[in-house]
Image (cartoon, grey):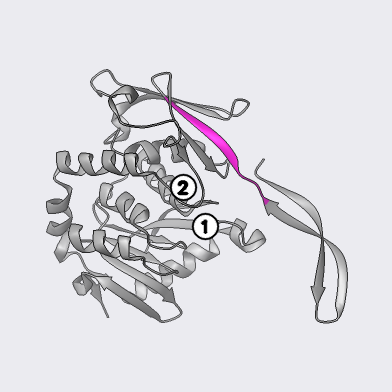
Amino acid sequence: MFKRKVKIFRIKKDKKEKIDDIVLYETPIDIYVNSKQIVNIICLANDLKELAIGFLFSIGIIDSIKDVIDINVNELENAIFVELKEEVKFNIEDLDITPVSRIVDTTCGISSPWRDVIKESFDRSNVKEIIKAKGKLKVKSSIIFLAAKEMQVNTPLYRETGGCHGAAIFDIEGNLLSVKEDIGRHNAIDKVIGDLLLKDLSFETVFLTTTGRLTGDSVLKAIKAKIPVVASLSAAIESGIRLAFAYGITLIGFVRGSRMNIYSHPNRIEL
């Protein structure tokens, strides 16, 4: 359960009435890798397999779903247990992650130690050159406008409560591949990335849409997946723009109606 009905008083103009309203609530979820707790994510408690796989991929612990032997969600314990193949060398003690750093909340996203882990994984996999090599990939602006609208249509919890974010992944023809919601904007992105990994779909020619601000944390996740185009209904933040420029990401904000702001690498967007 991740939503419930509450009684509220609503004032509209000169009328005050008691009505039912639907609210979402956050749940702390522990992710265990090879029986060791590595992180506690405050999230909307749905699509938890997708969340776990997307998070582990985004921070560089796994590179594909083939690195995972088993994943099990224990709803009673609010825990996700992931078992990795022996050849995946991971030990939480090898990382400079403090108990406080292991908490990922719904507002700030990942902490600095996790960002260091992510950037180290970029260096290992030559991410920057791979994304920049996708410079010839083109997406029509009309497809991005339609994708943003389709994401909104397929995020019912936002329409019902106004209390969560949405994210979606489309191919360059505008076909919807995945759409998810979460209270945290970064969690929603992890969920759609995890969904594609679980479906064993390629990130080769796709773009990402989100309702949230384009912060550095959000852009880092797109970089890890080598997604060359990221578009949001909201604004881009300096940290996100800086990373997008550096890694060759086309970053787009304020996709509303028939307008958008392109902050970096505009060559991929065609009229």
Q: Specify the amino acid type for callout 1.
A: His
The boundaries of the magenta stretch are 24-32
Circle 2 is placed at which residue position?
Answer: 187
Quadrant in which the C terminus appears: bottom left
Rendered position, 115 above or below 234: above
Residue linked to disc 1 = 165
Residue 101, position as x, y percentages in the image: 41, 37
- Rendered location of residue 28, percent (x, y): 56, 37
Tag count: 2
Q: Residue at x 19, y 57 (%)?
A: 247
Circle 1 sits in a helix, a strand or a loop, which is it? strand
Q: Residues within 10 Å of mark 1 (few under 14, many from 20)?
A: many
Residue visible at 27% across and 55% down?
A: 227
Res. 136 in view: yes
Q: Nearer the viewer, residue 120 or 20?
A: 120
Check disc 2 and give the amino acid type.
Asn
Rounded to the nearest whole Å, what is the CA distance between mark 2 and mark 1? 9 Å
Disc 2 or 1, which lies upstream in sequence? Answer: 1
Q: Position of residue 83 (x, y in %)?
A: 38, 22
What label does residue 254 carry, if any? none
Q: Is residue 26 magenta?
A: yes
Q: Position of residue 201 (x, y in %)?
A: 32, 45
Q: Residue at x 72, y 55 (%)?
A: 22
Left or right of 262, for residue 185: right
Q: Secondary structure at mark 2?
A: helix
